[in-house]
């Protein structure tokens, strides 16, 4: 028979990502119980800098126990829900529990959206979490080592072929940061590769890159990446196959490459199916303007897993961004223990970094590019990053990176220790 326990403060938060963690944090002393597979929250916008080695990977995540000091944390996942008894079954490190709640907050986030492209599952690399970022950094540095050891220049060029699919924030920022890392490493530490061609390619089915930002900033980014960084951009086309040696695009372009990074969007997590909640055609939980799940009186949902209507943008659902998740969490935390009010938020701006000292920023009545855009982007991320401890660590990393070269240590053995009898 399963052990039973009550959610702290009567509120159970399923998911400890940006949305769920902030709800628990903002509830303060009222408390909550969080069920999440990890004991940290990832600040996704800083992931590209972690991949490039500008930031220590531990510094782009925030310990949930420090961020939500009055919440109970259970590492695990929810496997079922009983709406009538107001309980869920959670499999955790400490065993399987039946947890009773008065208020259930669903913030399970999203997973990478993929398509049945031949070779993608076998050879492609994602860019969704810290493990992806560390693995991609190690793979890039290992590719440089492989190319440096080649006697065949054609194979060396293939080692230095990098294709990124998806020209949203994640794809563009990851490509820009890693392109910076690779060129800096070759310039300073790989003299035999200085005359070997690096081929960096960005692919997207949309007609433009960064289609969610103002057109002029998107055009500036396109020109900067192509003209200043030598990056090939293919828009209006898709990836049709990748075999670990060559990427083939829908327009017929064939790109010799051993690295393909897939950053072509997200979809709601399939785990939502275990909670017996109403879902829309895209698999998102349907909620009303107060973030309450349709047809319920004790369940709320927010973040990437929910179709959240926005009072300030009628007829449109919020995009899956940290900026919107934070504002949703602020509204929901107030609605859970006060008079419910509809959620409404108009974006104050958008920012993106394009490598070292380059970025873009769109603020009310102001559009910045280059160094100023980069500075504003970093300032915004520092503001949005929770807890003073993490802010201090990130500032320290940024300061150190101003005076020292990028570290090029490759640590692919991490997580794979040798057996004692080997």
Image (tube, rainbow, N blue to C red):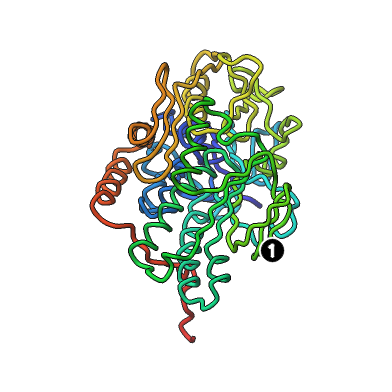
Total count of labels: 1
Residue closer to the observer: 341 or 1? 341
Instruction: Residue 78: give x, y in percent of width and height.
Output: 62, 45
At 44% from the left and 44% from the top, the residue drawn is: 228
| Residue 30, quarter of the rendered image | top left
| Residue 284, quarter of the rendered image | top right
Instruction: Residue 9: give x, y in percent of width and height.
Output: 48, 31
At 65% from the left and 62% from the top, the residue drawn is: 123
Q: Residue farthest to the left?
A: 403
Residue closer to the observer: 28 or 64? 64
Vertical placement of residue 303 versus 416, above or below: above
Q: Is residue 80 left or right of residue 422?
A: right
Instruction: Residue 336: give x, y in percent of width and height.
Output: 52, 22
Disc 1 marks which residue? 243
Residue closer to the observer: 69 or 7? 69
Query: Secondary structure under badge 1?
Result: loop
Q: Residue farthest to the bottom?
A: 421
Vertical placement of residue 323 versus 406, above or below: above
Vertical placement of residue 41 versus 361, above or below: below
Q: Is residue 269 left or right of residue 156?
A: right
The residue carrying pointer 1 sits among few (fewer than 14), some (14 to 19) or many (20 or more) residues within 10 Å by Cα, namely some
At 55% from the left and 57% from the top, the residue drawn is: 162
Q: Is residue 383 left or right of residue 302?
A: left
Instruction: Residue 183: give x, y in percent of width and height.
Output: 41, 57
């Amino acid at each position: 028979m399963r052990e039973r326990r009550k959610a702290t403060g009567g509120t159970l938060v399923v998911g400890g990502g940006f949305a769920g963690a902030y709800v628990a944090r903002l509830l303060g002393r009222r408390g909550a119980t969080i069920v999440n597979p990890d004991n940290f929250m990832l600040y996704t916008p800083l992931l590209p800098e972690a991949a490039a080695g500008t930031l220590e990977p531990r510094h782009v995540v925030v310990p949930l126990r420090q961020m939500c000091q009055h919440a109970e944390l259970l590492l695990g996942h929810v496997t079922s829900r009983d709406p009538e008894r107001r309980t869920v079954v959670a499999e955790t490190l400490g065993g399987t529990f039946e947890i009773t709640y008065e208020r259930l907050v669903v913030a399970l986030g999203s997973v990478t959206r993929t398509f049945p492209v031949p070779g993608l599952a076998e050879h492609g690399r994602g860019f969704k979490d810290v493990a992806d970022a560390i693995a991609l950094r190690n793979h890039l540095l290992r590719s440089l080592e492989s190319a440096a050891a080649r006697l065949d220049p054609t194979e060396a060029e293939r080692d230095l072929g990098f294709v990124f699919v998806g020209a949203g924030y994640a794809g563009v920022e990851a490509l820009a940061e890693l392109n910076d890392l690779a060129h800096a490493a070759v310039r300073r530490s790989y003299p035999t590769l200085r005359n070997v061609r690096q081929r960096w390619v960005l692919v997207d089915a949309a007609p433009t890159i960064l289609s969610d930002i103002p057109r002029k900033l998107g055009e500036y980014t396109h020109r900067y990446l192509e003209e200043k960084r030598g990056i090939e951009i293919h828009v209006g086309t898709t990836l049709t196959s990748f075999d670990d040696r060559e990427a083939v695009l829908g327009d017929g372009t064939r790109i010799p490459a051993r690295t393909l990074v897939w950053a072509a969007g997200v979809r709601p997590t399939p785990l939502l199916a275990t909670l017996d909640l109403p879902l829309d055609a895209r698999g998102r939980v349907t909620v009303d303007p107060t973030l309450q799940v349709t047809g319920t009186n004790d369940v709320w949902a927010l973040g990437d897993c929910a179709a959240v209507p926005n009072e300030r943008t009628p007829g449109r659902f919020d995009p899956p961004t940290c900026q919107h998740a934070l504002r949703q969490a602020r509204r929901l935390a107030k609605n859970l223990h006060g008079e419910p009010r509809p959620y409404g938020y108009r974006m104050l701006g958008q920012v993106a970094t394009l490598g070292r000292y380059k970025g873009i920023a769109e603020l009310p009545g102001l559009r910045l590019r280059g160094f100023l855009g980069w500075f504003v982007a970093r300032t915004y991320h520092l503001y949005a990053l929770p807890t003073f401890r993490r802010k201090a660590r990130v500032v320290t990393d940024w300061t150190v990176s101003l005076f020292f070269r990028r570290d090029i240590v490759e640590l692919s053995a991490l997580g794979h220790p040798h057996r004692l009898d080997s």
